[in-house]
Image (cartoon, grey):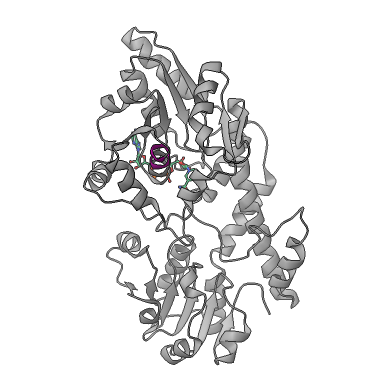
Amino acid sequence: MKITVIGTGYVGLVSGTCLADVGNDVLCLDVDANKIRILNEGGIPIYEPGLEAMVKKNEAAGRLRFTTDIEAAVAHGAIQFIAVGTPPDEDGSADLQYVLAAARNVGRHMTDYKVVVDKSTVPVGTADKVRAAIAEELAQRGVDTPYSVVSNPEFLKEGAAVEDFMKPDRIVVGAEDPRAIDLMRELYAPFQRNHERLIMMDVRSAELTKYAANAMLATRISFMNELANLAEKLGADIEHVRHGMGSDPRIGYHFLYPGCGYGGSCFPKDVQALERTAREAGQELKILAAVEAANEVQKHVLTGKIVQHFGADLSGRTFALWGLAFKPNTDDMREAPSRALIGDLLARGARVRAYDPVAIHEAQRIFEGEAGVEFAASPMDALADADALAIVTEWKEFRSPDFDAIKSQLRHPVIFDGRNLYDPAHPRRAGLEYFPIGRK
Ligand code: NAI
């Protein structure tokens, strides 16, 4: 099948590459000429495990190409995926300007039947807006080319995106027109594996499903974070509580980890956007308002522990930071809890020496010109001359450190662990003070 992917970011590049990998002829479009240049020169603009090799393989096979030429991109695919960003507007609602600009481009240039697929996370009712935007463009041209609009929200996780796309738990498709339904079934047939993964539904339900899933996951995190803070006050250990809760199959172990807050490009904005959608429909989502408020508190939980230990004035102190990305296996720092902690530490006069296996280039861009932040080439290098260590991202390489070496490097032997990476006995045995989240 001929497929166009509009927007070659995390979702667009992964989706386009995986669709090419099963034999489709894919053309990826982006307005960011720099991104397309990098891809056309054999590079890759983001870090995602396994993606680079897959891009190269499919490019070499002639099934995957990248362009900034809108007209050529619209002409190419019978299926046009819209995978552009939907950042939050000032009021928390999803900003649809990029989605609608992409839709207009399709309407402006299409000359034969197209299935236009909303893959971006978009509020309920967006498919209607996309349909209207295309209709307006066609009317301006005085043509009546047929098209369908489909909702196909993406559930891939950054850090495991290729695996998630190739072996999905589910593929949600909201489509109401038989011609589009047939095409979507054919497109996703190679991804069904041992049982049917395709869940067909109406367009509005598909749009809501994506927000519902992300909001549920964010709720679990904030719930566990509040419980962890309570466990600390009560002298209980959240790790035991987590085991005890998770063993109930109705609850399950997944996504039950307390920490220093959720971040990333999806949960914060999707929780806000769903709240906004509800408000517009005349309903308050009280739970989600609490989820968001709890997360704001939690992003500063390590600051609180640091201040309790060192006092409010941190001037002259340096903190080593392990982890900048909002989660492991990605270089994405959008809404990352590390940013909240770094901001707090700088505001209190401290300096930060940070290490991350892949996000340093992104952090350098974000903190450019910020004198108080420097970057280290290794976890141990980050500790040099630091007063204490704070752990913000649960990268695998942080899980079994040499605690004796950490102790010998730090001016004060203290670890503030925002991800509960260690059995508290281990750092303590090495003579380190250890402050995890919600543990004794
Ligand atoms: P991104 O910011 O990495 O990529 C979006 C790309 O679209 C950018 O490269 C931008 O230059 C391009 N673009 C903007 N307007 C365009 C236009 N008119 N024509 C062509 N290209 C255009 O965003 P990301 O993370 O890929 O997210 C895209 C959508 O997918 C968002 O709605 C997001 O909520 C959703 N999503 C993201 C996931 C993630 O893990 N990043 C997971 C699931 C859904």
Number of marks in the rendered image: 0
| Image location of residue 313, percent across then percent down | 46, 80
| Image location of residue 208, percent across then percent down | 60, 35
In this view of the protein, can residue 136 be seen by the observer?
yes
| Rendering quarter of residue 7 | top left
Q: Which residue is drawn at 41% across and 89% down?
A: 409
| Rendering quarter of residue 224 | bottom right
228 w.r.t. 411: above or below: above
> In the rendered structure, does residue 19 fall within the stretch colored magenta?
yes
203 w.r.t. 110: above or below: below
Q: Which residue is drawn at 26% across and 26% down?
A: 72
Q: Which residue is drawn at 42% across and 78% down?
A: 320
| Image location of residue 158, percent across then percent down | 47, 52
Please provide the residue range marked out in magenta: 17-21
Main secondary-structure element of the magenta-colored stretch: helix
Q: Is residue 210 left or right of residue 382?
A: right
- For ligand 1, the image quadrant comes to top left
| Image location of residue 365, percent across then percent down | 30, 59
> In the rendered structure, does residue 226 fall within the stretch colored magenta?
no
Between 380 and 438, the residue placed more toward the observer is 380
